[in-house]
Image (tube, rainbow, N blue to C red):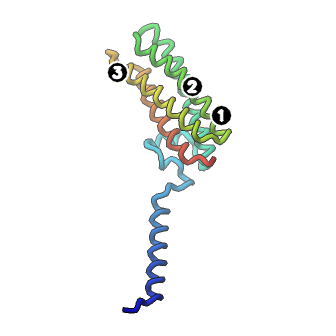
Amino acid sequence: MPINLNITVRTIFLLLVASCQSAAALRPSLSEPCMVTDFPALCRGTINGQTNVNAATDVAIRELMKRTRHARDIAKKELKVLDGGVATCLSNFNSAFDNLDKALKNVKENDGFSLNINLSAALTDYDTCSEAMKGSKEINVVYKSAGVLYKMADNCLALSTLVKL
């Protein structure tokens, strides 16, 4: 049984074109880096229209640092009123800030491996704070801040997967 080579080559070509189009549809648009995040609306509000993924990641980390500083200041005030959960958060906010500072340097140095480690560490710091505050009798601003900071750190980690190193 002879194979019609012309039909076979055309069929293979059409399959390859369809396959490439499907892969392109699954790849996030670089003009919309927040599409890879779990919290895209929060991400878009944080990166202020940046489409360059390195710049967007840098902006997102800087904004997270700013908000971490603010949460740390609130935790210092709350520490006088509340118990151990706030002390845990204060310690973790300090640790997260240090990890984010390192992450900014990692972006500049094109060190994707260390960037991932430092953003993951910051994410864990915020999660640890939330867990410590769950046992508290009242949900307060420190607990709520830790939740928002966790989401922002999660977005930073997602954006970091797009960083061109």
Amino acid beneath label 3: Lys
- Residue denoted by label 2: 97
Q: Residue furthest right?
A: 109
Q: Secondary structure at mark 3?
A: helix
Q: Is residue 14 above or below residue 149?
A: below
Q: Secondary structure at mark 1?
A: helix
> What whole-number distance in Å separates the C-alpha atoms at marks 1 and 3?
33 Å
Q: Earlier in the sequence, mark 2 or mark 3?
A: 2
- Residue 95 lies in what quarter of the image? top right
Image quarter where the N terminus lies is bottom left
Q: Residue furthest top?
A: 80
Q: Are marks 1 and 3 in contact (CB under 8 Å)?
A: no
Seen at 43% across and 90% down, the residue is 4
- Residue denoted by label 3: 134
Q: Secondary structure at mark 2?
A: helix
- Residue denoted by label 1: 105
Q: Is residue 87 above or below residue 98?
A: above
